[in-house]
Image (cartoon, rainbow, N blue to C red):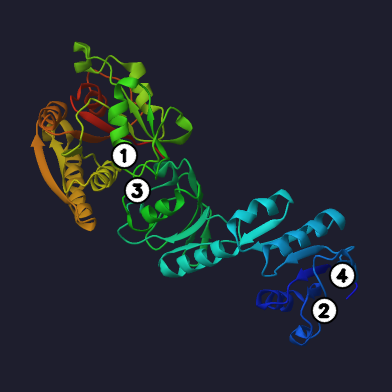
Amino acid sequence: MANKPRVIIAGAGQSGRALSLRLQAIWEVVVVDLEPGKELLLPGISYVTGDATSSLVLKQAGMQGATAAIALTGRDDVNLEFCRLARQIYQVPQVLSTARQSDQLKAFEELGVLTMSRPDSVASTLQSRLERGKRTTADVGLGQGEILEVTVLPNSPVIGKSMIDLSPQAWLVAAIYRKGTLVVPHGATCVEAGDRVLLVGEPAILPSIADFFRAGESEFPLQFGNKVVVTDPKIEAESQYLADHTKALGTTLSFDEAGCVALLPPSSHWLDNLGLTKGSFVQRVEAPRVPVLLARGTFPYQSIVVAVSQGRGGEVELAIDVARMLGVSKITAVVVLPPTLVSGAERLADLERALERSVRLGKAYRLEVEPVVLRGNPVHQLLDYSRNFHLLVMGHRPGRGVKLTRPDVSRLLLLRSRISTLVLCKRGR
């Protein structure tokens, strides 16, 4: 017994007794409570009858030299005084407590006491049981819901996405549990259906991120960051519109909270037709690791068209997410098939498969995706077709060189589009 660290527990209620019995194997446990007779419920555990806020009683209990003190009475004022004595008079290294009233937490924190809010802990536990596929914890980290575990369902848009693709800002994927194995995620690690993903981030947005991971609930722009960044007063109205009709927590001038960056497009020049101008502006589009809105004033976005690229670039998922946020029931997905001699049969087949996938994805989220196939020059066809819509959503691969013999289609689109354009930069793995 003498070699065990000593812990003094104030309160022999159900929590105090349960904790005492759990700790007695490796701790010297001493319980202090006003009510005599409860020692019968604690066989083998030292019990002191008395006031846990009395220095004399605590001295009798052996608070001097104790390694830890835990306050578990039913009164916050008693718990606070017990912790104050343990911390300031007896210099106990570890002092913990529960609090019934959330407004008392600050007083405990000022004493340096690790405190658990009983209402928040119960609510968190019940929420975890109620919301299938999503679990939170109250006894790890700050206990404020900044850690969540979520199970990825088969229709989640994050399936197949790498950590680089996701580009988290105010949150991150801390671990992936896959078929009984722990996967420590790195840049190229991809999410799979059935993964249990451990998310860490700001408590205000993390439940939304968990819903997005689980089943693709519309959360734009929280999967990227908190707010819409306004870079020019001329586009403040459109930026505010986007923030008001999505899950954004408002607008900001700071890039630290960016979930979407709104830019004022430059005036047009005939050389834009060749993609040879506006290099510095294109760099501004490519710099943020979040979607960029080229605000051309065609809001509200009552009709949305997405330029579908090869593979699984993410622009379709983004268009669906934004459409659902805005209450738009249908989007139009467009591919342009250049002549076979120019692109090759394999690339044409890839584009057709991408279009088919867009339609299936829309069905999964109960959103109509109208497929449209155009033929000819991709830039000319897309610019001409999109002019009747309010918002163009497109992907863009940063860092491509400008060549007259092989122009960058996405660069030309973002420079020459005449409607507001939401650009998702797709970075290589």
Q: Which type of secondary structure does the marked residue at label 2 adopt? A: strand
Name the kind of residue labelled 4 in the image.
Val
Q: Tell me which label, 2 or 4, sits earlier in the chain.
A: 2
Q: Toward which corner of the image does residue 215 lie, by quadrant?
A: bottom left
Q: Residue at 30% x, 16% y: name it.
A: 278
Q: Which of label 2 and label 4 is nearer to you? A: 4
Left or right side of 383 for 423: right
Q: Residue at 28% x, 35% y: name it.
A: 241
Q: Which type of secondary structure does the marked residue at label 1 adopt? A: helix
Quarter containing the N terminus: bottom right
Q: Position of residue 180 (x, y in %)?
A: 50, 67
Relative vertical location of residue 250 with respect to residue 131 in this rendering, above or below: above
Q: Tell me which label, 2 or 3, sits earlier in the chain.
A: 2
Q: Which of label 4 and label 1 is nearer to you? A: 4
Q: Tell me which label, 1 or 2, sits earlier in the chain.
A: 2
Q: Position of residue 247 (x, y in %)?
A: 35, 44
Quarter containing the C terminus: top left
Q: Where is residue 396 in the image (x, y as percent from the top left)?
A: 30, 32
Residue 244's disc number: 1
| Crowdedness near tag 1: few (<14), some (14–19) or many (≥20) residues, C-alpha within 10 Å | some
**What's the distance in space between the residues labelled 2 and 3, CA to CA?**
53 Å
On the image, numbered disc 2 is attached to which residue?
Answer: 47
Name the kind of residue labelled 1 in the image.
Asp
Q: Toward which corner of the image does residue 213 lie, by quadrant?
A: bottom left
Left or right side of 333 for 248: right
Q: Tell me which label, 4 or 3, sits earlier in the chain.
A: 4
